[in-house]
Amino acid sequence: MIRVLLAEDQSMVREALAALLSLEADLEVVAQAARGDEVVATARAHDVDVALLDIEMPGLTGLDAAAALRRELPGVKIVILTTFGRPGYLRRAMEAGADAFLVKDAPAARLADAVRRVLRGERVIDPALAAAALADGASPLTEREREVLRTAADGATNAEIAAALHLSQGTVRNYLSTAIQKTGARNRAEAVRTARDKGWL
């Protein structure tokens, strides 16, 4: 029996996925989590084989939870599920150590098949997303530029961003200016939108 952890913050979606997976004779959802920062402890407590992680969760994103899981419990296979098929997410998921990346509107049979395949040591990636990721190329943003844009996304002023990230206001201005240039945007709000749409944030 394959022991599965399902991490998804929307309880209706989580319960529906758990019900669908439980119809498979060789899969058992032994644990569920609603927050990304619960993933590692839950996986450890329930001795899971595979973790299915939504990208957008409170506490930690699915991508950050995947990276933590890879560090703490390297034997657990990781399947990232997302509503948004953004090429940048795929690239970041692979960098975080994910074994599979699927969009949520894929058939349940494909998800069950992906769980089995990652346990056999295979990588499973939605083919349309793989093609889009190759066409889009890597994110041009550095990690620091992403941090500054993420903080700016909530409407923070330069002073607030500087305080939150322990930077000078001049450095924040420089990072924002570079990020705006790299995204081809006219201002910081547009840069945030573009970076989010491409899955770079």
Image (tube, rainbow, N blue to C red):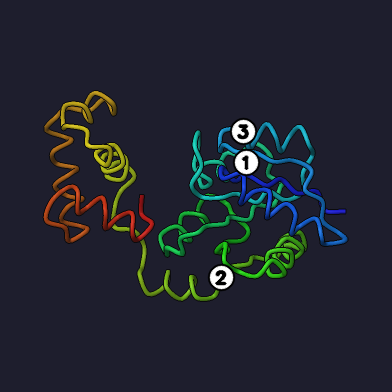
Residue at 26 percent of width and 54 percent of height: 193
| Horizontal and vertical percent position of residue 168 | 17, 27
**Amino acid under label 2?**
Asp
Residue at 42 percent of width and 63 percent of height: 86
- Left or right: residue 55 versus residue 43 is left
- Which residue is identified by label 3? 38
Determine which of the numbered discs, if any, sits on residue 69 in the image: 1
Q: Nearer the viewer, mark 1 or mark 3?
A: 3
- Which residue is identified by label 2? 126
| Horizontal and vertical percent position of residue 70 | 62, 44
Q: Choose the circle earlier in sequence order: 3 or 2.
A: 3
Determine which of the numbered discs, if any, sits on residue 151 in the image: none
| Horizontal and vertical percent position of residue 48 | 77, 44
Taking depth in this image into account, of 46 and 105 the one nearest to the observer is 105
Check disc 2: other Cα within 10 Å, few if <14, some if 14-19, many if 20+. Answer: some
**Callout 1: SS:** helix
Check disc 3: other Cα within 10 Å, few if <14, some if 14-19, many if 20+. Answer: some
**Amino acid under label 1?**
Leu
